[in-house]
Image (tube, grey):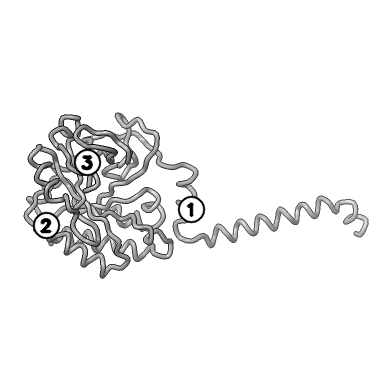
Amino acid sequence: MKEFFLKHRRALILASIVLILVLLFTTTSLTLPRGSRSKLIDQINTCSVPTGEIVAHGIDVSKYQGDIDFESVKADGYSFVILRAGVSEGMDTNFESNYEKAVSAGLDVGCYFYTYATTTEEIAAEARQVLKYIKGKTFSYPVFLDFEFYDLQDYDRYDENTAMINKFCTIIKRGGFYPGVYTSNSIYDSYIDCYELGNKWDFWIACYVDHSFEDESFKDGYSMWQYSDSGSVSGIDGNVDLDVCYVDYPALVSEFKENVSKYIG
């Protein structure tokens, strides 16, 4: 036995090392925090783009784009605009004027609200505030929750984040408006229950990759894709976010409004 060990010592040591590494890998993979696997996949293969059909091209804007000539935006080939209604601290100072000018230019309009909330109680209060901001306005695109605050990007917040999104969208829907969620592909994959939420609410995903979007869509299940944060559009000084939409929202939102009591009920 001693002679066998001495003769095959190197092979036995190598086999032992391999066995230890296999056990370590197996244990680690079984105890990965929720979302780690999808995060790893994101890093390896970010933003796959299977074939799909684009319905409309649009932009999203806030006070940071300044005074916008929406007539020129439309003439440049964009049919919709998503306006920032506000953030947790209050209404966007250009929201009212942007809304009036965009509607006057004949653009389809939606809005979004950027949250810093970290609890369902806080986001419920914000949703009710958003309903005050948009009262009396007509939208042909959704009212989106902008869910990207850094503090929300935590694996331990998975269930709380999911509950927050459900709470916001439910309040907006009960207020008579069609809700949606804006976020990044990494948050969608890692920090929320995308299976539950994706079956309830429409998602608008931000992901900036090389693209040829004339005959491609971002990913099955996403309604809109923000593909650039550095676009150039007539009527706007400086960079602007660019989006494509895969859903006929004017028709969908119109149908929602006609049957709003059924949807709310």
Q: In the rendered view, does 153 fall on the left or right side of 65?
A: right
Please state which of residues 159 and 107 is positioned toward the viewer in this rendering: 107
Q: What is the quadrant of the C terminus in the image?
A: bottom left
Q: CA distance from mark 2 to mark 3?
A: 20 Å
Q: Residue furthest bottom?
A: 121
Q: Are marks 2 and 3 in contact (CB under 8 Å)?
A: no
Side (left or right) of 247 relative to 20: left
Residue drawn 34% across the image and 33% down it: 51
Disc 1 to disc 3, C-alpha distance: 30 Å
Up the image or down, 56 lies above or below 188; here it is: above
Looking at the rendering, which quadrant does residue 225 occupy? top left
Crowding at mark 1 (Cα within 10 Å: few <14, some 14-19, many 20+): few
Q: Please determine whether, in this image, residue 234 is positioned above or below residue 241.
A: above
Residue type highlighted by circle 2 = Gly
Looking at the image, which residue is at 33% across and 45% down? 206
Find numbered disc 3 in the image and state the secondary structure of the residue it sits on: loop
Q: Is residue 118 above or below residue 247?
A: below
The residue carrying mark 1 is: 37
Mark 1 or mark 3, which has the lower sequence index?
1
Q: Picture quarter containing residue 217?
A: top left
Q: In terms of sequence position, does the residue under pointer 2 or pointer 1 come before the other?
A: 1
| Residue 160, percent from left and from top | 34, 66
Residue identified by numbered label 2: 176
Of the image marks 2 and 3, the number of the one nearer the N terminus: 2
Say which residue label 3 marks. 247
Q: Is residue 187 left or right of residue 54?
A: right
Q: Mark on residue 20?
A: none
Instruction: Kindly identify the residue that appears in the image at 29 percent across and 38 percent down.
Output: 239
Q: Position of residue 151 (x, y in %)?
A: 38, 61
